[in-house]
Image (spheres, rainbow, N blue to C red):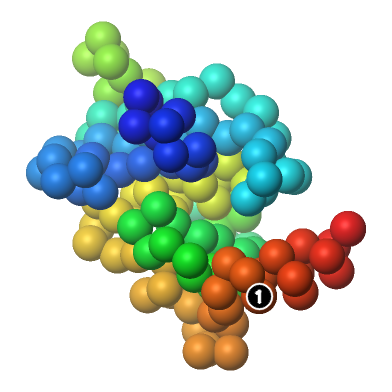
Amino acid sequence: LRVLRQKGGMGLAAPQLGELQRVVAIASHPNARYPYAPKMAPMVLINPVVQEQSTEWVKDWEGCLSVPGLRGLVPRASWVTVTYQDRQGQTQTVTYEGFVARIFQHEFDHLEGRVFVDRVESPLELMTDREFAARVVVAGS
């Protein structure tokens, strides 16, 4: 969680830090990169397993601390139900929806050896952070 706060990210997976563990941290909060993000308490999910997910897919823009300077339009399930162990070793189940579901799926992909650009359907759906700020953020204002 400390690294996540330092980098200002929404999520981080252990492999991004060189750790070969199935652990993700997510912490949605509005910031300059994602001003529309909902606020949630930070969570650490150990050995997460996707139990169920929506059949409805939604495309939205994503970036990644592991792929600096690039954004992509990524399709994700609109909701996902996950079981995991918490920091006390207790099994928990949670359903994430919307933007938080997107964050979880993005971080879970890191555990599976994927990054967001692997899911982008067309090179035309990639752009630099600078292009994103000028075209997408301004258009959405």
Q: Which residue lies furthest to the left in this view?
A: 20
Is the residue 59 above or below the residue 100 in the image?
below
Answer left or right for 58 relative to 102: right
The residue that appears at 60% across and 25% down in the rendered structure is: 40
- Residue 19, x across and y down, in percent: 13, 41
- Residue 100, x across and y down, in percent: 58, 41
Answer left or right for 77 relative to 92: right
- Residue 77, x across and y down, in percent: 55, 58
Residue 105 visible in the shown view: yes
Is the residue 40 above or below the residue 9 in the image?
above
Residue 57 visible in the shown view: no
Q: Which amino acid does the dot numbered 1 rest on?
A: Glu
> Which sits in the foreground, 39 or 85?
39
Image quadrant in which the N terminus is located: top left
Is the residue 63 above or below the residue 95 in the image?
below
The residue that appears at 25% across and 35% down in the rendered structure is: 23
Quadrant position of residue 125: bottom right
- Residue 68, x across and y down, in percent: 42, 62
The residue that appears at 45% across and 29% down in the rendered structure is: 5
Quadrant position of residue 128: bottom right
Q: Which residue lies furthest to the top in this view?
A: 88
Secondary structure, mark 1, is helix
The residue that appears at 58% across and 35% down in the rendered structure is: 28
Q: What residue sits right under mark 1 in the picture?
A: 131
Answer left or right for 140 relative to 115: right
Answer left or right for 85 relative to 127: left
> Which sits in the foreground, 135 or 86?
135
Tag 1: Cα neighbours inside 10 Å, few (<14), some, or many (≥20)? Answer: some
Image quadrant in which the C terminus is located: bottom right
